[in-house]
Amino acid sequence: MLRAFGPPENLIVTDVPDPVPAAGQAVVDVSAVSITFVETQVRAGRPPHPRMTPQLPVILGNGVSGVVSAVGPDAGRELIGRRVVTATGGSGGYAERVAVPAAGLTEVPDGLSLTDAAAVLADGRTALALIRAAAPEPGMTVLVEAAAGGVGSLLTQLATRAGAKVIAAAGSARKTAVASELGAALTVNYAEPGWDAHQVDVVFDGVGGSVGNTAYRMLKPGGRFYGFGMASGAFGPSTEDRPDVTVTRGVPVTPDQLPGLVKDALAEAAAGRIRPLIGQVFPLAQAADAHAAIEKRSTIGKTLLTVG
């Protein structure tokens, strides 16, 4: 529970009544919770957009995996016992149980753990949407920023599988080594000078700020820039002064496409065609520690909370 914006320790463990499913809802006994960088910004009181500021008190968390334990009227009792992933509507996910619309549940395929499913839920749909929009192919060079992060690690795998030459960019030698293991043809450390000595056809910018601005300059004429994150605190590029390149801000997806993307991402993971990179797992009661680790930039891949 977050009762006041501020440092990670403002996330406190508390008891609240168990959710009761209303009409059309299902209760999910949570197994794993996906943490996003944006949630650390919201907790601190510095969300990317003012409209993302929640009313307090609030339970953070927007993506969970688990098992359906109860349903309300008009939800279908056949759902009980099914392994699912779901968004929670923007809040409520850091909990042992959540009540969500039954229509928003996506069944987890056999062979995929609930932990991996939680890691794929948001990052997988984002990565698939970006890859499908960019459509990399053999002969192209693709720059993936934050390549050892949740989305970046999946983009590295997907672009490599499409036959593109992937340049994986990250902020430490430890993270570039991870990206290399994921299949990147070349790695660069944007904490070191000269990392921008390459020309690329596509940029996936999950960092923004000065890194995004530099990556924008690396594009060849006709290149495409996809800005989907702002780990630096600001979106990039800060200017669009090149008529010879195309800039897309945000993930190119409509709300009605999200369920299909989630289902496809889970299927890719179940088939072993993508591997979610889970770097850190914290018990639910240590959500504050998870936020602190993310803010220190010490995390690799996806950070999850687990329940039970």
Image (tube, grey):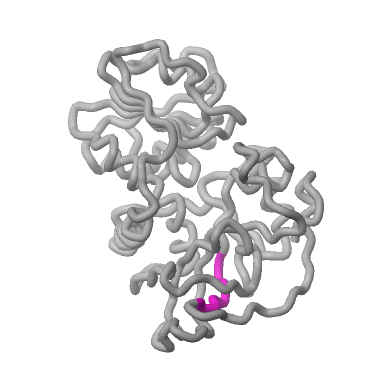
Question: In the rendered view, would you say 122 is above or below 48?
Answer: below
Q: What residue is at 28 percent from the left and 23 percent from the top? A: 201
Q: What residue is at 66 percent from the left and 42 percent from the top? A: 41
Q: Quadrant of the C terminus?
A: bottom right
Q: Main structural element of the magenta stretch: helix, strand or loop? A: strand
- Choose between 57 and 297: the one closer to the eye: 57
- Choose between 200 and 226: the one closer to the eye: 226
**Where is residue 217 shown, x and y percent of the image?**
41, 14
**Picture quarter containing residue 205?**
top left
**Most distant residue in the left direction:** 138
Question: In the rendered view, would you say 119 is above or below 109?
Answer: above
**Where is residue 103 shown, x and y percent of the image?**
41, 71
Examine the structure image and report whether residue 175 is included in the region drawn in magenta: no
**Where is residue 287 shown, x and y percent of the image?**
70, 57
- Choose between 232 and 273: the one closer to the eye: 232
Question: In the rendered view, would you say 93 is above or below 147?
Answer: below
Q: What residue is at 41 percent from the left and 85 percent from the top? A: 76
Is residue 142 toward the left or the right of residue 241 in the image? left
Is residue 65 toward the left or the right of residue 160 in the image? right
